Image (cartoon, rainbow, N blue to C red):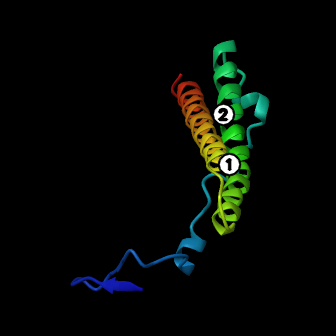
């Protein structure tokens, strides 16, 4: 979708996605070789690599906590459907959920801090 300006030329609007005119343009990056992983981190210091590793571990921990919290939430649903839930079981599940939340918060903070620190350096 193009808009015609007063002088007769066509102006592109925000809805012009993937027009044929853009395909005719020359790709300026086609002759640039791709960088390998070792090229990406060759100037990294030991601290940068430590920050990237801590970010990776933090992100993996947050990702692993998601299925664990789903399982614990299933225990909550099972307990809610029972005839007479015991207070000790409710307390135990609540403590598990709080522990998962604290671990997720610390791991997410460590992951974000690690990735941002290594990215800014």
Residue 55 horizontal/vertical position (percent)? 65, 31
Left-right relation of 121 to 67:
left
Which badge, 2 or 1, is on the more N-terminal residue?
2
Residue 92 horizontal/vertical position (percent)? 66, 43
Q: Residue at x 65, y 53 (%)?
A: 86
Q: Residue at x 72, y 22 (%)?
A: 42
Q: Secondary structure at mark 1?
A: helix
Is label 2 in contact with label 1 (beta carbons under 8 Å)? Answer: no
Give the labeled residue for mark 2. 58
Q: Secondary structure at mark 2?
A: helix
Q: The N terminus appears in which quarter of the rendering?
A: bottom left
**Of residues 114 and 100, which is closer to you in this image?**
100
Q: Check the image and name the residue furthest to the top.
A: 46
Mark 1 packing: few (<14 Cα in 10 Å), some, or many (20+)?
few
C-alpha separation, residue under disc 2 versus residue under disc 1: 30 Å
Residue 90 horizontal/vertical position (percent)? 62, 50
Left-right relation of 49 to 28:
right
Nearest to the eye among marks 2 and 1: give it. 1
């Amino acid at each position: 979708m193009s808009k015609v300006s007063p002088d007769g030329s066509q102006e592109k609007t925000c809805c012009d996605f993937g027009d044929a005119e853009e395909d005719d343009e020359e790709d300026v990056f086609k002759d640039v070789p791709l960088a390998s992983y070792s090229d990406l981190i060759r100037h990294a210091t030991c601290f940068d690599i430590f920050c990237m590793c801590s970010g990776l571990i933090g992100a993996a921990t947050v990702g692993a906590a998601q299925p664990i919290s789903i399982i614990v939430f299933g225990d909550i649903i099972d307990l809610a459907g029972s005839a007479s839930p015991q207070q000790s079981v409710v307390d135990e599940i609540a403590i598990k959920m709080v522990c998962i939340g604290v671990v997720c918060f610390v791991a997410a903070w460590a992951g974000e801090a690690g990735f941002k620190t290594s990215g800014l350096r």
